[in-house]
Amino acid sequence: MNIITTEDLCYEFSKGTAVLKNVNLLVPEGAVYGFLGPNGAGKTTTLRLLLGLLKMQKGNVKIFGSPFAKNRISILKQTGSLIEQPSLYPHLTGSENLDIYRIIHSCTKQRVDDVLKLVKLDDARGKLVKAYSLGMKQRLSIALALLHKPKLLIFDEPTNGLDPQGIIEIRELITSLAKDTGVTVLVSSHNLSEVEKTATHVGIINKGTLLFQGNISELRKMKEKNNKAVVCTSDNNAALEIANRHFEGAEINGEKIMFGADDKSKIAMLNEELVRGGIGVYELSTMKNNLEDLFIELTTKDNADINN
């Protein structure tokens, strides 16, 4: 079952300037869905539409299998969120901030204790929020989002501006929430390495267009498909002719020949044929793409169809 489904979601802030172009999200139940894209890609706009913070222009949104427009209140009662900067009362303590929202959500006082322990702020419950670090404020905001035991959490760049320790703390918190409570998490980020460490599923958006959607293993397979092999020889022109018999798209790049490295047996055959032909092989290696390279490649293309 998909907790979030969007159908051809479109949005314009001004006439003729599309922010979202037919975005079709599928967020499975229990997933940590990393919503990736550069700044200005359309991530925050999408999340605001999912929460009803922007008026729908075109497309449909279903959450928990129900149309959002007709079930807004019931859906939001089951949803916790943190969009951009946390809204906290700096002159109150962490516990007092939670107590205000506890009354709004009709939660027990015990629930305040529970969420403070979950986000590891139990020892700072009596401290004024204005004395909290940015990481502590982020964790307190997540505690507010968790207070009413939501089935869905939506976080917009929750590690933005944090130091390395704060990033690790938020990452571990998101992972444990999904694992221990079964809550579905949709988290946006522009940092692929962070998402890779937490997400089970990934959506990559750029210039309002969804370029990729699938589980993290599918993204890793794409990375492997894009690995390149490099050979440097005594006669690259002659070697290129031989390489083209085995590899489509082999080309000379500087002093080396580059080609796809998805078939290791063909690489061995190429090496053997080069040596038999009297061509000296100075170097034969593979260049493995990391996910960050793939992300940059996808998001720097004007029109990307990653399924081809």
Image (cartoon, rainbow, N blue to C red):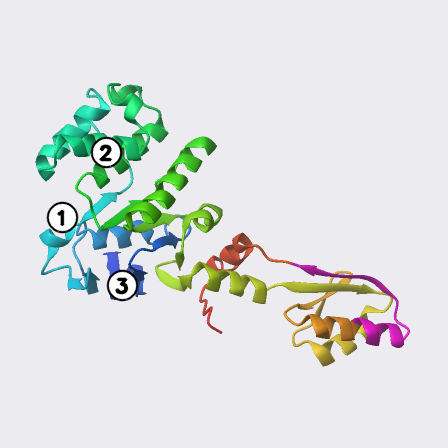
Report helix, strand or loop for mark 1: loop
User: Which residue corresponds to mark 1?
Assistant: 77
Quadrant, the N terminus? bottom left
Residue at left offset 27%, top offset 48% = 154
Give residue 168's position: percent from left, percent from top: 44, 37
Amino acid bearing label 3: Asn
Task: Categorize mark 3 by other alpha carbons within 10 Å: few (<14), some (14-19), many (20+).
Answer: some
Q: Which residues are magenta?
A: 271-287
Residue at left offset 40%, top offset 64% = 214
**Gap in angstroms between the C-alphas marked 3 and 1:** 18 Å
Looking at this view, name the residue that lies furthest to the right.
278
**Gap in angstroms between the C-alphas marked 3 and 2:** 28 Å
Give residue 144's position: percent from left, percent from top: 22, 36
Task: Categorize mark 2 by other alpha carbons within 10 Å: few (<14), some (14-19), many (20+).
Answer: some
User: Which residue corresponds to mark 2?
Assistant: 114
User: Which residue corresponds to mark 3?
Assistant: 2
| Residue 278 is one of the magenta-drawn residues | yes
